[in-house]
Amino acid sequence: MPRKLTPGELIIATHNDGKLHEITALLGPYGVTPVSAGQLGLSEPAEIGTTFAENALIKARAAVAATGRVALADDSGLGVAALDGAPGVYTADWAEKRSFEGGPGRDWYMAMGKVEGKLAELGADVDRSARFFSTLALVWPDGHHGLFEGSVSGSLVWPPRGQKGFGYDPVFMIDGDTRTFAEMDPAQKQKIDHRADAFAKLVAAVF
Ligand code: IMP
């Protein structure tokens, strides 16, 4: 029997505003008030795991250790079929600017360009299918945890299109639609994306 989550404040182990907005919208109806690690000034742990689940647990456990309260983390990324699933767990790292690129900091247009460059090397008729993944880790102060995995399938467009959303949204077109995630109203994207898929499983288990 999965452990239930009681209404009230929940620590969200993220410094990413895009994720925080989505998670706030997804949890609102359940009486949970998200407070992010970023808002609390918590430091970001090194994401040294090799799977989304490992990294989600690292982030949630760090937030529990710092606050003594239940914490939720999302680890997510983009897997491109023709690149054997890359960038995968390294999706955020591909956006990291090196010093000669004006770093430190993250540049999502540079990251999308890297993906496109690698696809271009494989030829004009390369398979452009891709999948967004999200793994949620919910960790309690006594160490108990739950893991919930979601994903959505789509394809990559080039050049990037749309001004909404965050990260790789301007190049991802979910199957069955002609708009990129960045061309969709965020409220609509949040209902159909990989995080919504993972949240549906979390909600079914803990509320
Ligand atoms: P991490 O989960 O913090 O390791 O970061 C994963 C990265 O994947 C994010 O920083 C985003 O750039 C990207 N990503 C995850 N979810 C989405 C999404 O819904 N849209 C666009 N990019 C995303």
Image (tube, rainbow, N blue to C red):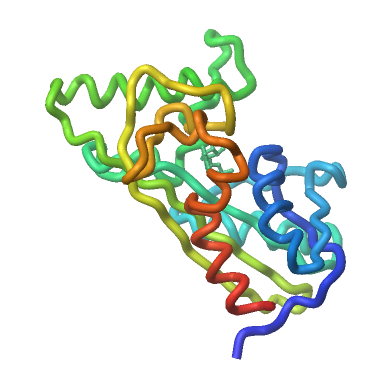
Residue 32: x and y, percent?
80, 64
Name the residue rendered at 58%, 28% in the picture.
164
From the image, which quarter does the N terminus lie in? bottom right
Vertical relation: 199 (above or below) 59: below
Name the outermost residue toward the bottom: 1
26 with respect to 128 (left or right): right
User: 26 or 45: which is nearer to us?
Assistant: 26
Vertical relation: 63 (above or below) 99: below
User: 59 or 73: which is nearer to us?
Assistant: 73
Name the residue rendered at 42%, 24% in the picture.
112
Name the residue rendered at 53%, 8% in the picture.
100
Residue 48: x and y, percent?
54, 49
3 with respect to 115 (left or right): right
Residue 98: x and y, percent?
54, 17
User: 182 or 108: which is nearer to us?
Assistant: 182
Name the residue rendered at 63%, 74% in the picture.
145
Number of marks in picture? 0
